[in-house]
Amino acid sequence: MMKRIISITAAIYLSVWSTFGQDKPMAYINARIIPIVGPPIEQGILLVQNGKIKAVGDARTVRLPAGVQTVDLAGKVIMPGLVDSHSHVGGGSGGDASGPIQPDVRLLDGINARAASMQRAQAGGITTVNVMPGSGHLDSGQTLYLKLRDNAVKIDDLLIYYKDGKYAGGIKFANGTNSIRSGGGAFPGTRAKAAALVRDQFIKAREHGDKIKKAGKDNSKLPARDLGLEALIEVLDGNRVVHFHTHRHDDILTALRLQKEFGFKIVLQHVSEAWKVADEIAKAKAPASIILIDSPGGKLETTDIKFENGAALEKAGALIGFHTDDSITDSRWFLRSAGLAVRAGMSREKALYGMTMANAIMLDLQTRVGSLETGKDADFIVLSGDPLSVYTHVLQTWVEGKKVFDRADAKDYLIAVGGFGAATDGDMHIECFDGDIGGGN
């Protein structure tokens, strides 16, 4: 009992010390800095305080304040924390078998903030992530944009909030074979019926919104509450982005057709056959979040996926991001996606942009994350070498100025490389190995 009290006291002390320690400026010096929005900076300086970036540059442009603590990272590389625009870390659940369109479902109510997959993402250098429900529905529910902060006890500890106080997130749509069911019933049996069901629901949402507007302040004239239609009204008003799972070229065009018809914001997800319709995607100004897997298979509609997707979309002028669809791509190997894209003809600059800033734009978080710029959140990673090299390791991951992963730490190393205990939810950073409260970075 006494041992447990001491552990709790120590944990509280460390927490308080960490909170006050954030007031002290930290300067990470002599690393090669890749800010994403400008050229790399040799022997760069990244100045951080109170969870924000205070300055980035070199000795000629950055003046270090009095009392600054410096960390010499000579021989290392610093770049922004990676942004994953489509993941399933946390094992979140979405819609069920009761119907094909379920916009009222909130991933918030079905995700495990203590899941080991969150920490594996930290080990891969991911600091911001769009966590999605599954794709077995035309609309499987509302997504969450999360910051992978450490020692999360509940999902609220990871949420990102907008200025109006709402937590950040989009909504998941899908077409193609995932949402098709044979034998009749509520789910569509064909691609054409799938699109028809989506159109019908958007029309209902538009009509519901019109009734709300006409009622004005007269509550007696308000229509009955409908959480699903209210979520779709947010989509129609441009306040919730549609993340549209789609693979085949004809399905991609159907998604773009629906977007044009109803005017919602869209991010195309996967787009396995993007290379076939890259010009159409660019013309529609639709961002495309792609996945690159080194062992394709599993679905007939992904038969024609190509590593050249990134290069084709770049040539067409589209905004390109990357995602893991974790665990399709393990979050620990996310950086490899950029390397594979460059190997297939995509430029180095756009590939790294796609791992960071492009994804931030897709999540409407570009003013906070995605690049190393003054005033942005201090989300960054320290690499052992070039980010596109297979020999490079993520050495450290920092979220809002706090270290959430350190490869030199035995517990974090286990998460990074695997082994007994590495997949145990909530143990590594929430509790010490002996079961007492404390631990973590």
Image (tube, rainbow, N blue to C red):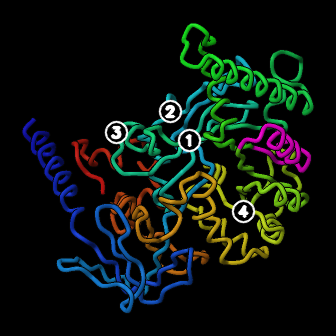
- Disc 2 target residue: 108
> Residue visible at 75% across and 24% down?
100
Helix, strand or loop at disc 4? loop
Nearer the observer, 281 or 395? 281
> Residue visible at 79% across and 25% down?
203
Cα separation, mark 1 vs mark 3, equals 20 Å
First in residue order: circle 1 vs circle 3: 3
- Residue type at mark 2 is Leu
Nearer the observer, 75 or 33? 33
- Residue type at mark 1 is Gly
Q: Which mark, by number, is residue 319? A: 4
Find residue 411 and report its image quarter. bottom left
Cα separation, mark 1 vs mark 2, equals 10 Å
Q: Indicate left or right for 139 with 24 as reference.
A: right
Give the quarter of the figure containing the C terminus. Answer: bottom left
* In front: label 3 or label 4: 4
Does the magenta-highlighted stretch encompass residue 304?
no
Helix, strand or loop at disc 1? loop
Cα separation, mark 4 vs mark 2, equals 28 Å
| Residue count near mark 1 (Cα–Cα under 10 Å), binned few <14, some 14–19, many ≥20 | many
> Residue visible at 70% across and 17% down?
98
Find residue 386 and report its image quarter. bottom right
- Disc 1 target residue: 169
Helix, strand or loop at disc 3? loop
Cα separation, mark 3 vs mark 4, equals 35 Å
Does the magenta-highlighted stretch encompass residue 248?
yes
**Residue span colored magenta:** 245-264
- Disc 3 target residue: 153
Cα separation, mark 4 vs mark 1, equals 20 Å
